[in-house]
């Protein structure tokens, strides 16, 4: 098989040892004679998989005991609606807009109550984030929502705002587990699995217990966090195979030394690409350096008529899925946990060669 590096924003690259393990266990999981796909979600085999997956995630993120971990479906987009259903409780909510995904969250939440956009980086083209001191927070809000890593625009928050006790709800889809976080600073953390965790079909929700009591009576049972928490995320059939793969990814992460160790590698990977982008005139990234994402790095060729040639040559070198999001254009390299540093080295080498040929 030829060596490739997959820079897709999601569904994205998975650690090779995880895929190999899944392959080895595909037909017969641990002597059960069954594939994980064929198991009853309530049987002892799958129950043990789910319990270990949750325990390993708790270990990785040091999740306090007063937080529930839910394994849900519908992706992060479904949570955009599920969050107000579970939390608004007749109040308003504050939203901060820092890119395409948080903007979408506002649109999806509006149907459920009063949504206030309290800060936005849209006029600046989402190249930076609004300073915490400029967030016009309402102290009566049910929660404050923001996206901690904007996958499409390439901006990331490394600090957590002080919301004076109003619970923070954070969409961490594209950088969860890329570095340590202090879970206790958040009310709710959520993310679709297909960026930095595992296959599509699974959405993780980490929710503080005291926030489970305020859901609208109209919330469907599968989207009702308390009901799901009381039933081990099994009010209906959970996405069993996606949970299993997520569990293998968590084991792999622990073997790497956990999120502290992977953060160091992620910093080194991001620096490699940003340092080059800052040195050359041929390519550019216009995100304010303090808020540049370590996971999703959009960049442009100065001469955009070379875009197709760039993508074609990259593809021929096994550097795949570098095309930028259709709303932003240009290129984007997503370099999640599972992207080895060799992949970023190969990308930078290729970009240097392409620059030499075309300048
Ligand atoms: C991908 C992504 C989403 C959408 O996730 P789905 O699982 O497709 O619903 C939402 N927010 C962020 C930050 C994302 O990266």
Image: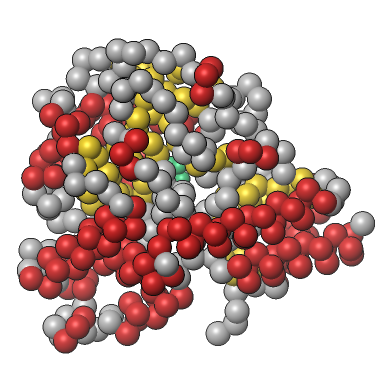
User: Total number of numbered labels?
Assistant: 0
User: From what the image shows, is residue 250 above or below residue 306?
Assistant: below
- State the quadrant of the C terminus: bottom right
Q: In terms of depth relative to the viewer, which is nearer, 95 or 327?
A: 95
- State the quadrant of the N terminus: bottom right
Judge from the rendering whether residue 354 lies leftward or rightward of residue 332; answer left or right: right
The percent position of residue 246, horizontal first and vertical second, equals: 32, 63
In the rendered image, is residue 121 in sight?
A: yes
The structure's colour scheme is: secondary structure
Which residue occupies 41% across, 54% down? 177
Which residue occupies 27% across, 49% down? 63
User: From what the image shows, is residue 154 above or below residue 261?
Assistant: above
Which residue occupies 27% across, 44% down? 206
In which quarter of the view is residue 170 placed? top left
Q: In terms of depth relative to the viewer, which is nearer, 217 or 206?
A: 206
In which quarter of the view is residue 80 placed? top left
The percent position of residue 79, horizontal first and vertical second, equals: 31, 38
Q: In terms of depth relative to the viewer, which is nearer, 27 or 348?
A: 348
Q: Quadrant of ligand 1?
A: top left
Which residue occupies 52% across, 19% down? 133
The percent position of residue 257, horizontal first and vertical second, equals: 42, 67
In which quarter of the view is residue 313 placed? bottom right
């Amino acid at each position: 098989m030829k060596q490739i590096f997959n820079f897709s924003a999601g569904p994205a690259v998975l650690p090779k040892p995880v895929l190999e393990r899944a392959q080895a266990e595909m037909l017969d999981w641990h002597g059960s004679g069954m594939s994980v796909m064929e198991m009853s979600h309530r049987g002892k085999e799958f129950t043990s998989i789910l319990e270990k997956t949750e325990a390993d995630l708790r270990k990785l993120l040091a999740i306090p005991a007063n937080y529930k971990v839910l394994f849900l479906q519908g992706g992060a987009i479904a949570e955009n609606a599920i969050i107000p259903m579970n939390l608004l409780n007749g109040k308003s909510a504050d939203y901060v807009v820092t890119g395409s995904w948080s903007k979408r969250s506002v649109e999806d939440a509006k149907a459920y109550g009063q949504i206030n956009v309290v800060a936005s980086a849209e006029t600046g083209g989402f190249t930076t984030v609004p300073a915490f001191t400029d967030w016009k927070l309402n102290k009566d809000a049910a929660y404050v929502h923001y996206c901690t890593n904007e996958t499409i625009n390439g901006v990331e928050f490394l600090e957590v705002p002080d919301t004076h006790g109003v619970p923070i709800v954070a969409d961490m889809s594209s950088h969860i587990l890329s570095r340590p976080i202090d879970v206790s600073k958040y009310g709710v953390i959520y993310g679709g699995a297909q960026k930095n965790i595992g296959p599509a079909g699974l959405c993780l929700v980490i929710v503080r217990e005291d926030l489970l009591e305020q859901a609208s009576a109209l919330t469907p049972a599968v989207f009702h966090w308390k009901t799901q928490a009381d039933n081990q995320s099994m009010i209906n059939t959970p996405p069993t195979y996606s949970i299993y793969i997520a569990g293998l990814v968590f084991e792999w992460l622990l073997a790497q030394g956990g999120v502290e160790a992977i953060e160091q590698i992620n910093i080194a990977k991001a620096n490699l690409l940003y340092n080059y982008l800052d040195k050359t005139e041929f390519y550019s990234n216009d995100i304010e350096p303090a808020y540049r994402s370590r996971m999703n790095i959009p960049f442009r060729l100065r001469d955009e008529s070379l875009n197709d040639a760039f993508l074609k040559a990259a593809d021929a070198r096994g550097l795949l899925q570098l095309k930028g999001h259709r709303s932003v254009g240009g290129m984007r390299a997503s370099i999640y946990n599972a992207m080895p540093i060799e992949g970023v080295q190969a990308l930078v080498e290729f970009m240097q060669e392409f620059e030499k040929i075309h300048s």
